Every structure is written in C-alpha cells, then in structure tokens.
Image (cartoon, grey):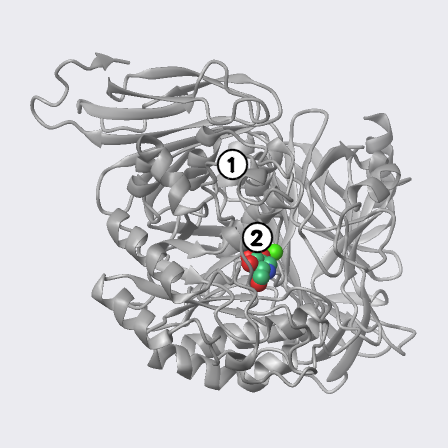
Amino acid sequence: MLRTILLFSLFFATAVQAQQLLSPDKNVALQFTLLNGGVPSYTLSYKGKPVIKPSKLGLHLKGDAKSLLNDFTVTNTATNVFDETWKPVWGEVSSIRNHYNELAVTLTQKETTRQMIIRFRLYDEGVGFRYEFPQQKALSYFVIKEERTEFAMAGDHTAYWIAGDYDTQEYDYTTSKLSEIRALMAKSVTDNLSQTSFSPTGVQTSLMMKTADGLYLNLHEAALINYATMHLNLNDTTMVFQSWLTPDVNGDKGYMQAPCTTPWRTVMVSNDARTILASKLIYNLNEPNKIKDVSWIKPTKYVGVWWEMITGKSAWSYTDEYPAVQLGITDYTKAKPHGRHGANTANVKRYIDFAAQHGFDAVLVEGWNIGWEDWFGNSKDFVFDFVTPYPDFNLQEIRSYAASKGVKMIMHHETSSSVRNYERHMDTAYKFMKANGYDAVKSGYVGDILPRGENHYSQWIVNHYQYALEKAAQYQIMVNAHEAVRPTGIARTWPNLIGNESARGTEYQAFGGSKPNHVTILPFTRLQGGPMDYTPGIFEMDISKLNPENKSHVNSTLANQLALYVTLYSPLQMAADLPEHYDRFPDAFQFIKDVAVDWDDSKYLEAEPGEYITVARKAKGTGKWFVGSVGGNDPRTSQISFDFLEPGKTYIATIYADAKNAHYKTAPQAYNIRKVVVTSKSKLAQWVAAGGGYAISIEAAEKGQTKGLKKL
Ligand code: NOJ
Ligand code: CA
C-alpha cells in the first residue's frame, strides 16, 4: 500500500495537467494527466482502490521518430453526459441502458502541430477509451508500428488467460498469477494448431483477472473496425500490460488515414463477478444498428450433420483420392467414393426429420460441397467454390424436403482460410444461398491464412471478416463465423452476426477434451464481445462409441450440457449430438427442446470465474424462465433464490440435475429430473457434480397442475 501511495505521489509530482472524471454512480474515477514532456497518461480507481496505476498512452508510428507519444499540450477538453436506452434485435435482455460520463481531451503536439483526441467514457462498471485522429493537414496517412497503451496493474493478480497467439483462440484457459504466466506459457500452448511464435508473457483479450482484495477486472476492446486486434504484453517485473497489435505480413500494425479512430480499449471493474457478466459496456461502445429491416434476423436453434465428422465417425470429403484436382477429378461422379461421406441425401433427410419432429428451426450440413479432398491434400490454390455439391448431396431434393417439413437449411462455407478465393466467390455464393432458400451461413477459417504470412487477427483480415458480414447483410444473410477474430460488440451495429466461435468450443471435447471448468471462464472472457456458437448438447461422452479410433472423452456431465444453453448466451444454439443419442435420453432432451434462444431479461445469480456460473433468463414474450448453472472441476452446492419470479404467482419448475454419483469422468450420464412447485419465495440448494451443473425450466402453473407436486 505504501508503495502504491509513493508511486502515486511520484506520478502526480511530475504531472503538469490533470483532469478527473467520475462514473455516473461515482464509484469509478478516471484521472487523465499530461506528464512532464507532454506524455498523456491515465489512472483508474474503483471505490478508492487503484485499478489502473499511472499508465501511458500513445502510438509509435513507422518511420516517424517523434510518433504520437509525447510533446503534447492539452488544447481542449470537453465533457458530456449520455443516458439512453436502446433495444437490441436479440439479446440477454430486451432493453439496454447506455449511461456514461465522457471526457474528450484534445492534444496538440507542439513541434508537429498534429492533433489527437483521447476520448474516455466512464460507466459504473468501467471505462472505454480510444484515440481519435481528426482530419488535419499535419496528419493524414500514417502507419502504426505499435500502439503504446499501458494498463498498469496494482498487484500480481490472478488471471484467466490464453496465449497471445496471432492465429487461434482455441485454447483451454490457464489460471495463474500474472507473475507465473512466463513459466506456464509453453505448457499452455501444447497441442495447439498454431505455428505462430509469440511473446513469453503475451496474452489475449478479453482478459479476466481477480485481485487479492476481491476486485474483478476485465481488459478487452470494443468496436474493432479497420484496425489490428489487440493482445497484451506483460512486463512481469512492473506488472504493466502494454497493447500489442497483430502484425500484417510486413510486420506493420495498421494503415491509417485521418479522420479515423482506434477501437475502444476497455477496463471493467467490480467487486461482484456477476456485474462483469451482466455488463453491456462493450455493446454500448459500439455504434447503433445499421440494418433497417431486421425482420429476417431470427434467433435459431439447430441440429446438424457435424458432430459425426468432428468425432471421425463420418467424413466431410466424398473420396479418398487426394488431392482430387491434381488427380484430374473435377467431376466427382467419376471419383471412387469412400462411403463415409456424412452429407449424403439420405442422412441429411434423417436430420431434417429429426429437426421437424422435435421443433428445431434449422439443419446445418457441412461437407456438402466439393473441395475437401484438395484442402486435406494441402492444396489451397484450388479449393472451394461454395456452389458445387458432391454428387450424393441432392440440393434440390433436400431443399424441397426441408421446406415441406418447415425446416430451414444452414449453409456452410469452409474457406480453408483462402481468403482471396472466398472474396472472389462471395457474391456468387451468397446469391446461390438466396436462390436455394438459405438465410444463414456458418463460415470457417481453418489453417494458415492465404495470402501467405497474414495472421488471423491483423487489420487486413479483420477488414475481410467485416466485409463478409456487411455483404451478407446486403443479401439478408445471417453469419456465424468460426476461427474469425473474437467479437468486440459489433453485433450491435450488425445484428446479422448471430454467432462466432473464436474460442475453444465443443469440438475440442472430441480432440482430447477440454478442462471441466472451461465453461465457467468463457462468459467472463470470450462472451464479453458477443455470442458464441459453442455447440453444446453432447449426451454421449465416450467418443470411442462413435469412432473406435477416437479415445477422447467429453469432460462434462449431461446436466452440465443442458445448463450451457442458458449459461452460454447465444441467439444461435445447436443441439450438437447425434439424433440417435438424443433418442436414448428423451426426458433430458426435453430441456433442449423447450429452452428459449431469445430473452427479455437475465439475472446472474452466482458467479466466480473458474468455479461456477448460475443465471436465470426470462424467455422473450412468453413469461417462462430458464435457469442454468455450471460448476467447475470440483463438486459444490449451488444456493439460489427464486425472487426473480413474479410475487404471488405459482410456478412449476422442472429441475434437471446431476445424480448423487455423477462425475464428468466416471458417471457423466447420471442425472435425475424432478418437478416441484415454486414461488418468488422459494430457495434451492442444489448439489453440482465435478464438471456438472443443472438446468431448470419454469412455467406458470395452470389450475390443478400443481396437484401431487411438492413445494420446493
Ligand atoms: C472448424 C470449425 O470450428 C468446425 O465447426 C468445422 O466443422 C470445421 N472447422 C470444418 O469446417
Ligand atoms: Ca474451430
């Protein structure tokens, strides 16, 4: 503490100009200070406790010794109060309050007369700030060598982190002290697909942390548009993070032309972990919706010809003749089928029947189009054209069959990261979708990006993901992009972005398994920027039952899988397992059939990163409530109150819980289901297994329905 005070006084002693800003509830305080030499800096505190210690701001420009780092004077300051409520097209809640106090500091560099504005927006749960470059003679085009934004931590916090990789976010999280990151880095990247080398103390955002005195901190960014993704590089002696942008093929970090802005850098803080989960700070920092007619954007629950390929039970490709094009196979009717192709007409119809029977909106089919042989044969020069089906996938027949059953088909575009190839075919591919009744696409960017040397998160490819999204909006197509950059709230502006993967999803349960507590960290990190297509709902945890050669195990109980539909918010939810597995557990499957995908309200009841999350959500327009609770690596008892229900009303709750002997490894399918009567006064103490969870559906009781049921 003494050290902190000393540091603070040292800081202020060298300060030449300072501005203070408070959050609407006055708990968060921001101080902007121009240090000696005209160096911009800031601090942040929460209820008097330091959150961000004196931290410098600025940018290092390429070929410009002066850069935008110092020699500034404050030539203007402007404050503003903003309070507005907006309605998202889909979401965890039906209306969102955007309430902040703003400070915009105009800085002029003495020698160059260049101007830069640093705009701060202070919310009750943190801050967003960005650099703005107004149109001016002294600064028009510039290349960023590195952004030099600092986030000086006030201690050696516990962090929930993944490696600062430029090409993938599909990691299990490591929980450690900041000072331990260096030692644990190598271990954290084993089994990873990426070939990128990275800094020994570099991590990705959204970075979640907890301080020794119980503050929850989160560092991320909002509105990542026309800019490189920010990772954070830690100086583990001083505990100062510095922004670390993803380079392009030349090592440059950003091509800028004024007027322009950077994305918002965000720091969230609270003494209650639930506040971080409920925060809408990232969305609020994004621009309002730009799509006028949103009638075609629909939250969707779907099944798909997918898990069978992921587990290796069937294949995306049609033939084993790799690479097909080099072998002269462009007409696949002449190729020898290997007989394990998942996307064949009969199998697809089976999924359509299942979707129709159980009330799902849509069916995703992967491996329907030619090109997989070439990709697996490592040819990227000819890969996918996104319009040519394999000979055993009868597009017309499937199209009319699905339509006759009232089921939508979801398109799949695996780009193989051949981005130029995708851009060349994009208009044709989207037109083809519309002509054939598809209004949603799952896209994917597996493997190294072409053009060679580009990374998954540099400015150039961030622009590609945005281009694909905006073009899709023109065609009224919803997008769910896998392996694309992690979201930063852009779905507020472009609500056709109904899903992203951009983290370790369920597929890894078939690639060796994920940590049981993974799902208790994702909502604090990856989901801060937008929904995740996590693809929950696995009922058969022993993958060797699907494919004897795959010894992977799903590290989750069945009840935990049900809870994920509520705890991992997404307007796009898959029931990822095979129809035959759901047929074995029809009583538990009922929850997946019933659960909503769009909400009027959400109440976070319990939360601790790495340990547990419990949330209650009110289904949009129906008055039904659903509760989901997930646990971590150890068993626990969840304690909740039903005071979110309307007082005086009687409800029936169906509780899907881990059985006494349940355990993610030894007894994942041990669950029980009970029906009880609840009111707003009810309380529940529910045991949760290791890697377990529970799910509850709650409906208002009609007359006579409570007969024979116990009160909770
Ligand atoms: C990786 C995606 O995450 C997965 O869902 C997809 O099936 C494969 N790529 C193939 O495109
Ligand atoms: Ca993936």
- Rendered position, 7 above or below 54: above
Distance from mark 1 CB to nearest ligand 2 atom below 8 Å: no
Residue 310 is tagged as 2
| Residue 532 in sight here | no
Foreground residue among 494 and 149: 494
Residue drawn at the location 65% of the way across and 26% of the way down: 214
Q: Residue at x 36, y 65 (%)?
A: 409
Q: Is mark 2 within 8 Å of ligand 1?
A: yes
Quadrant location of the N terminus? top right
Marks 1, 2: nearer the viewer = 2
The quarter of the picture where residue 699 lies is top left
Q: The residue under label 2 is which amino acid type?
A: Ile
Q: Amino acid at mark 1?
A: Thr
Q: Quadrant of ligand 1?
A: bottom right
Q: Quadrant of the C terminus?
A: top left
Q: Earlier in the sequence, mark 1 or mark 2?
A: 1
Left-right relation of 325 to 400: right
Q: Position of residue 243 (x, y in %)?
A: 77, 56
Question: Which x, y percent locates residue 522?
Answer: 58, 42
Location of mark 1 (residue):
275
Q: Is residue 505 above or below residue 212?
A: below
In this orientation, which residue lies closer to the viewer: 687 or 592?
A: 592
Observer-nearest residue: 412 or 393?
393
Mark-to-mark CA distance, 1 and 2: 36 Å
Residue 179: % across, % down:
85, 35
Q: Nearer the viewer, residue 673 or 572?
A: 673
State the SS at label 2. helix
The quadrant holding residue 385 is: bottom right
